[in-house]
């Protein structure tokens, strides 16, 4: 692939289905999101050459189909295959899609995910089925899946830098403020205060229930094509400026070097090198927010504030509506919907198209969206980080 990646490919179709619908399978949600993306792009299904199934769920929730949404929709694609690696499915799919387009194998590439996690959680009654054990040794110590591992890093950040629960709360409150401007968010019309946060149940110290992301049913999909073909699609193209990846596997958790940082550095270096811009050029960011602490750490690691100052940065209102850096402007995973890294990508496209309504960030031209796949504190958690920069 040509090293000059910037602006050669564009996202031209978007489909998001964020509804709680018991009885629907993940594949049904995925197929509907894909149909919406095709319609949004003004394309026919016969114009889709490759379909990518983005598996964004964990190792105990792997989708159990091989020929999926393309067959449901009757898409005569040349190829259908799966990509899965934590919350980096968007970036990995973009990389694969770009190569398929560059080689002339595809004119248009459709990427889609689906989940029915909310429905499944409500249908299960036992702790064992609702909270599958991701580790091999954690049950006797009170393991609660992802919250346990992320809470260890959050508490370490508090220990090293004096980060407070009130600063974690500032992330959750800002997410709700944005969600209350987004009629499609799960928690639309449900603002929270500091008092609400402090009354919420402790899940795994220091996390309260309001530090944790929502659980969702639904699906998300996008279509990418070349910049040349993008000029003929129905919606304004959103150009891909760069992508980046990082993984904490190079520094294992027992080395005690990465307790308060994510694998941002290599991803940041590559994505900004390709995009040819600096951090100051980013107008808004969609930062992966499975837990409140993830946002604080990313703000530090990308350089919007110094290490240890992320708590004060969010407490000052900088990421909330009207703040210096609009973050997770649709409500993010904390308050809108949990479609892994598709949540941030979709909001980035909506903002850059100018379709965000009451939450629209004025003069939004460049947006970064990230993904994170857990921490190396369990054999079942991957610690990948991904970044993509988009422009209108």
Image (cartoon, grey):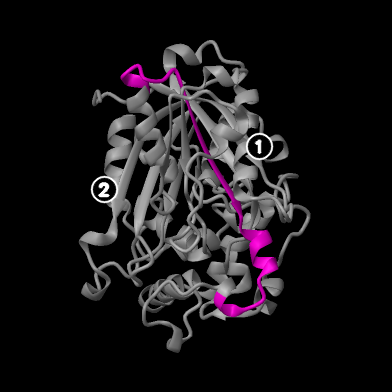
State the residue lying farthest toward the right: 189
- The residue labelled by disc 1 is 32
Q: At which x and y percent is residue 210?
A: 63, 69
State the residue lying farthest toward the bottom: 140
Q: Secondary structure at mark 1?
A: helix
Of residue 322 and residue 242, the one placed in the foreground of this image is 242
Name the quadrant containing residue 278.
top left
Of residue 218 and residue 168, the one placed in the foreground of this image is 218
As drawn, 196 above or below 350: below
Of residue 280 and residue 136, the one placed in the foreground of this image is 136
Within-10-Å neighbours for mark 1: few <14, some 14–19, many 20+: many
In-image side of 264 versus 216 (left or right): left
Please report the residue visible at 63 percent of the width from the left and 52 percent of the height from the top.
Answer: 337
Please report the residue visible at 25 percent of the width from the left and 74 percent of the height from the top.
Answer: 256
Within-10-Å neighbours for mark 2: few <14, some 14–19, many 20+: some
Query: Which numbered tag is attached to residue 266?
Result: 2
Q: At which x and y percent is residue 226?
A: 42, 18
Number of marks in picture:
2
Query: Which numbered tag is attached to residue 315?
Result: none
Q: Is residue 67 visible?
A: yes
Q: Secondary structure at mark 2?
A: helix
Q: Is residue 354 magenta?
A: no
Q: CA distance from mark 1 to mark 2?
A: 35 Å
Residue numbers of the magenta segment: 101-128
Name the quadrant containing residue 194.
bottom right
Please report the residue visible at 57 percent of the width from the left and 37 percent of the height from the top.
Answer: 69
Q: Is residue 350 visible?
A: no
């Amino acid at each position: 692939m040509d090293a000059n990646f910037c602006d050669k490919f564009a996202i031209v179709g978007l489909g998001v289905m964020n509804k709680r619908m018991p009885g629907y399978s993940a594949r049904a949600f995925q197929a509907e999101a894909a149909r919406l993306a095709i319609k949004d792009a003004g394309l026919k299904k016969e114009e889709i050459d490759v379909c990518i199934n983005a598996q964004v769920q964990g190792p105990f929730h792997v989708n159990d189909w091989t020929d999926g949404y393309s067959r449901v929709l009757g898409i005569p694609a040349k190829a259908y295959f799966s990509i899965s690696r934590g919350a980096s499915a968007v970036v990995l799919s973009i990389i694969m899609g770009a190569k398929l387009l560059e080689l002339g194998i595809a004119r248009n590439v459709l990427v889609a995910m689906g989940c029915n996690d909310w429905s499944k959680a409500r249908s299960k009654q036992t702790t064992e089925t609702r909270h599958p054990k991701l580790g091999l040794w954690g049950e006797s110590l009170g393991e609660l899946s992802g919250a346990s591992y992320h809470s260890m890093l959050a508490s370490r950040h508090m220990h090293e830098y004096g980060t407070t629960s009130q600063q974690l709360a500032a992330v959750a409150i800002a997410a709700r403020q944005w969600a209350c401007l987004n009629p499609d968010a799960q928690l639309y019309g449900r603002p929270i205060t500091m008092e609400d946060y402090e009354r919420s149940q402790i899940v795994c110290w220091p996390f309260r229930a309001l530090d944790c992301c929502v659980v969702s049913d639904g699906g998300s999909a996008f279509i990418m094509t070349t910049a040349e073909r993008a000029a003929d699609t129905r919606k304004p193209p959103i150009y891909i400026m760069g992508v980046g990846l990082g993984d904490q596997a190079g520094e294992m958790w027992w080395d005690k070097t990465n307790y308060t940082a994510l694998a941002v550095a290599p991803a940041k270096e590559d994505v900004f090198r390709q995009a040819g811009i600096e951090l100051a050029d980013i107008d808004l960011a969609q930062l992966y927010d499975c837990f409140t602490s993830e946002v604080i750490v990313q703000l530090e690691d990308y350089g919007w504030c110094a290490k240890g100052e992320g708590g004060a940065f969010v407490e000052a209102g900088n990421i909330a509506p009207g703040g210096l850096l609009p973050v997770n402007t649709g409500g993010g995973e904390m308050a809108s919907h949990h479609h892994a890294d598709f949540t941030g990508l979709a909001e980035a496209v909506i903002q850059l198209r100018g379709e965000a309504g009451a939450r629209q960030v004025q003069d939004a031209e460049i947006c970064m969206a990230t993904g994170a796949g857990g921490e190396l504190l369990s054999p079942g958690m991957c610690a990948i980080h991904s970044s993509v920069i988009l422009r209108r």
